[in-house]
Image (spheres, rainbow, N blue to C red):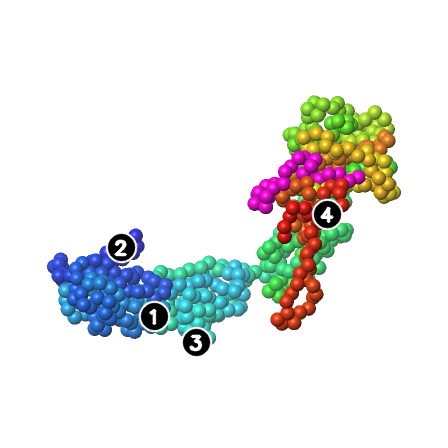
């Protein structure tokens, strides 16, 4: 739209300059460029009718066809009988308006047609290299432009505007440059606001000023001080107190850590973190209850070298601790020799334990439901355990406390609380909850009402590793670490189907077929394997139940997050199959002279469950 308006206005000015509405013999139908351009462009003028003989097409244009002001070298030719093309042969000056005018007979026939454009108009790009809100009160202001300018011109056409009036900028002599530093004629106020304005400025060697005045809000940096501290008050909940120190200017992390002290001492106050802009230091700590704390910040130096003028002090007092429960959540193996399942509580008069022992034939169903075991904030308050769906009957017990502001430990005997006998081993699903807890909306992990755990009380430590072609289960004693022989291992698919049963050897091992056999997953071609089962370790998921005497343990192949083969730089198998080809290749020696022939040796073996490695049959390499 702006180009059309400029073009229309220009055409109108041409017509008026030619003395009114008299229609020229030849009209210019279009031309480029117009308005502003950022780099030199081909100049094209198109007429409404042929203006040259056909013999001149593709020939160089007569240098007297146009005049250029300011002058620059150019070459031109006639693209056809109606189109004149002019290519600038020299670099155009920035911040400069150029006029191209037809001459001679063409000028007469078009009523003295002219076109104009501005090459690379001057632009102020702002303050560079420093924070525009933290300018030094007694230093220079670095200003950036899109092209070289003269420092004297900047000083003449730019200034700072403040509440007390205008402040001139002083320039040091030098060659034109795109980045210049000018100093205010008088010191600026600390923490004061100004507007940097420029008007009428022209680039070095140009003839056209800024299209419109430029302005930028800037401010000087204030003196270093602590502008805010939290928390405030006389009854701050004492656990996980968030303390924030806000500074007027940025500081380094180590400087903040060294400058902050407290009485009584707060463990970890020197391990806080700094905001990205360096102005807020934050630390979280558990504090003593009903205690007055005095915080002092002294000797602080900011990133500009400004020193804190005097120490800053702040006091607050803690009240009671929040009601909280703390326990291991998620999936947990509890050694049979332990006193019980540890549950810590503070400032809770009573909490409930709802739990049940999970029979062996319900374990796989439980592990493959959508129940949330997330130890980092799962166990949603609005999703209690559906015991009926699990087909087990839960028991409920209450635990009462009388002591205030001190952590109380209860070792829950899950066999006695949830099962049929004290010390009974097995798998237990439990939920510990208290309505006295008020959830922290900002830190849900800190004080959940419901704490859920799937606890396996056992002395059997079980490891399962499954590949597509083979796998193993390893059973050891949690108490001694010794291998457990004679343990019965039953393997299930996530759908609850039993696919393998075996007994551990003297070394605690039982070898199992790979997932391709147990889950009847056919091998994939390389092309299919790329897109099939992107999380292939889940496709190999198997669940093992291990029993010996009265002891029972479980392991789920889906619990291996974080220790996958790619963590060790090993490429995972995405093709599956009951057999695998393993290959090794090496050169005949490690050092060669130029021109020598390199020989390679290769060994390939087929690996299958229950068979020794053998040379692949019916394969070619």
Q: Which mark is residue 92?
A: 1
Instruction: Please name whichever residue, 520 or 104, is drawn nearer the observer in this view of the structure.
Output: 520
Q: What residue does disc 4 label?
A: 614
Query: Start and end of the magenta stretch?
Result: 510-536
SS class of the residue under badge 1?
loop
Q: Do the residues labelled 3 and 4 touch (CB within 8 Å)?
A: no
Q: What residue does disc 3 label?
A: 175
Residue visible at 53% across and 63% down?
A: 130
Instruction: Please name whichever residue, 471 or 208, is drawn nearer the observer in this view of the structure.
Output: 471
- The part of the image, by quadrant, that contains residue 362 is top right
- Residue 377, given in percent of the width and then of the height, sits at 67, 38
Residue visible at 33% across and 68% down?
A: 96
Say which of marks 4 and 2 sits in front: 4
Q: Which mark is residue 5?
A: 2
Q: Which of marks 4 and 1 is nearer the N terminus?
A: 1
The answer to whether residue 111 is magenta is: no
Say which of marks 1 and 3 sits in front: 1
Residue visible at 30% across and 54% down?
A: 2
SS class of the residue under badge 3?
loop
Q: Do the residues labelled 4 and 1 touch (CB within 8 Å)?
A: no
Few, some or many residues within 10 Å of mark 1 (<14, 14–19, 20+): some
Say which of marks 3 and 4 sits in front: 4
The answer to whether residue 24 is left or right of residue 272 is: left
Instruction: Please name whichever residue, 192 or 246, is drawn nearer the observer in this view of the structure.
Output: 246
Residues at marks 4 and 1, CA–CA distance in whole angstroms: 77 Å
């Amino acid at each position: 739209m702006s180009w059309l308006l400029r073009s229309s206005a220009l055409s109108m000015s041409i017509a008026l300059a030619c003395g009114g509405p008299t229609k020229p013999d030849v009209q210019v139908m279009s031309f480029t460029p117009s308005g502003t351009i950022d780099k030199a462009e081909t100049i094209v003028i198109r007429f409404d009718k042929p203006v040259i003989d056909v013999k001149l097409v593709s020939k160089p244009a007569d240098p007297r066809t146009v005049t250029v002001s300011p002058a620059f070298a150019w070459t031109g030719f006639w693209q056809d009988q109606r189109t004149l093309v002019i290519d600038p042969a020299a670099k155009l000056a920035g911040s400069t308006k150029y006029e191209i005018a037809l001459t001679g007979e063409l000028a007469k026939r078009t009523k003295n047609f002219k076109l104009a454009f501005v090459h690379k108009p001057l632009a102020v790009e702002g303050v560079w290299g420093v924070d525009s809100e933290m300018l030094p009160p007694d230093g220079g202001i670095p200003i950036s432009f899109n092209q070289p300018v003269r420092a004297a011109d900047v000083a003449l056409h730019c200034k700072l505007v403040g509440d007390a009036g205008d402040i001139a900028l002083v320039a040091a002599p030098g060659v034109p440059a795109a980045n210049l530093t000018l100093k205010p004629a008088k010191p600026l106020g600390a923490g004061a606001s100004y507007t940097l304005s420029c008007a009428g400025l022209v680039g070095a060697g140009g003839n056209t000023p800024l299209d419109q005045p430029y302005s930028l809000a800037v401010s000087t940096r204030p003196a270093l001080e602590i502008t805010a501290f939290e928390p405030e008050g006389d009854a701050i909940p004492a656990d996980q107190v968030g303390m924030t120190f806000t500074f007027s200017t940025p500081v380094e992390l180590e400087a903040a850590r060294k400058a902050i002290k407290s009485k009584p001492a707060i463990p970890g106050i020197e391990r806080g973190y700094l905001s990205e802009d360096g102005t807020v230091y934050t630390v979280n700590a558990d504090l003593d209850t009903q205690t007055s704390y005095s915080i002092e910040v002294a000797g602080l130096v900011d990133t500009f070298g400004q020193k804190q003028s005097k120490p800053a002090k702040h006091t607050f007092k803690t009240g009671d601790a929040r009601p909280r429960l703390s326990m291991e959540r998620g999936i947990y193996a509890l050694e049979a020799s332990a006193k019980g399942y540890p549950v810590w509580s503070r400032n809770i008069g009573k909490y409930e334990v709802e739990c049940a022992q999970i029979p062996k034939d319900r374990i796989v169903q439980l592990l493959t439901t959508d129940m949330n075991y997330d130890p980092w904030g799962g166990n949603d308050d609005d999703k209690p355990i559906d015991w009926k769906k699990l087909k087990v009957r839960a028991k409920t017990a209450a635990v009462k406390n009388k002591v205030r502001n001190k952590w109380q430990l209860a070792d829950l005997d899950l066999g006695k609380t949830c099962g049929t006998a004290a010390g009974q081993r097995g798998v237990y699903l439990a939920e510990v909850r208290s309505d006295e807890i008020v959830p922290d909306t900002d830190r849900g992990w800190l004080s959940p009402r419901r704490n859920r755990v799937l606890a396996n009380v056992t002395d059997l430590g079980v490891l399962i590793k499954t590949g597509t072609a083979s796998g193993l289960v390893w059973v050891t004693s949690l108490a001694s670490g010794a291998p457990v022989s004679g343990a019965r291992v039953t393997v299930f698919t996530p759908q609850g189907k039993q696919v393998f049963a075996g007994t551990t050897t003297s070394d605690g091992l039982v070898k199992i077929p790979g997932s391709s056999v147990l889950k009847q997953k056919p091998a994939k071609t390389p092309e299919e394997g790329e897109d099939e089962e992107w999380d292939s370790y889940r496709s190999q998921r198997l669940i093992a139940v291990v029993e010996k005497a009265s002891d029972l343990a479980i392991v789920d192949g889906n619990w291996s997050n974080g220790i996958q083969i790619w963590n060790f730089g090993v490429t995972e198998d995405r093709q599956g199959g009951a057999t695998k080809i393993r290959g090794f290749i090496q050169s005949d020696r490690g050092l060669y002279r130029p021109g020598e022939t390199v020989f390679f040796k290769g060994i390939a073996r087929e690996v299958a469950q229950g068979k020794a490695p053998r040379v692949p049959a019916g394969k070619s390499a």
